[in-house]
Image (cartoon, rainbow, N blue to C red):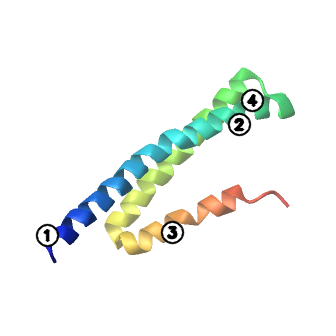
Amino acid sequence: MPARQKSALRWVALLVLLAGGFLPPVDFFIVNVVLSLIHESLGATPAELQLVISCYASGYAVLLITGGRLGDLFGRLIAIPSRRQPVPAAAAPPS
C-alpha cells in the first residue's frame, strides 16, 4: 500500500473516531431538548423528567457495553449490524 494511501486512511480513521466521540453528547442533547416537550404535553414532574434522563443513560450504557462485548466475541462485522437494529425499532412511531 503506498504511503499516500496509508496517510489518507489514517485521516479517515481519525474522522470516524472523532464522530464516534461526538455522537453521545449529541444524543443526550437531543433528549434534553425533548424534555420540555415531554413536560408540556404529558405534564411530567421534574422527578419524572430526571427519570427519563436516567433511564436513557442507563440503557445507552448497557447497550454500549453489550455491543462492545459482542464485538469482542464475534467480531465487528457481526456485532455492528446487530447494534443498529434497536435504533429504528425504538424510533418507529407507535401504531
In this rendering, the label closer to the viewer, 3 or 4:
4
Q: Nearer the viewer, mark 3 or mark 1?
A: 1
Residue 56 relative to residue 17: left or right: right
Q: Which residue is mark 2?
A: 34
Is label 2 in contact with label 4 (beta carbons under 8 Å)?
yes
Q: Position of residue 35 (x, y in %)?
A: 71, 32
Which disc is residue 82 wearing? 3
- Mark 4 or mark 1, which is nearer to you? 1
Q: Position of residue 19 (x, y in %)?
A: 42, 51
> Residue 36, which numbered label?
4
Spatial separation of the CA atoms under disc 2 and disc 4: 5 Å
Residue under circle 1?
Answer: 3
Query: Considering the numbered disc 1 on the image, is that residue within a helix, a strand or a loop?
Result: helix
Give the vertical position of 67 relative to 81 (above or below): above
What's the amino acid at mark 3?
Ser
Query: Residues at badges 3 and 2 in contact (C-beta under 8 Å)?
Result: no
Q: Residues within 10 Å of mark 1 (few under 14, many from 20)?
A: few
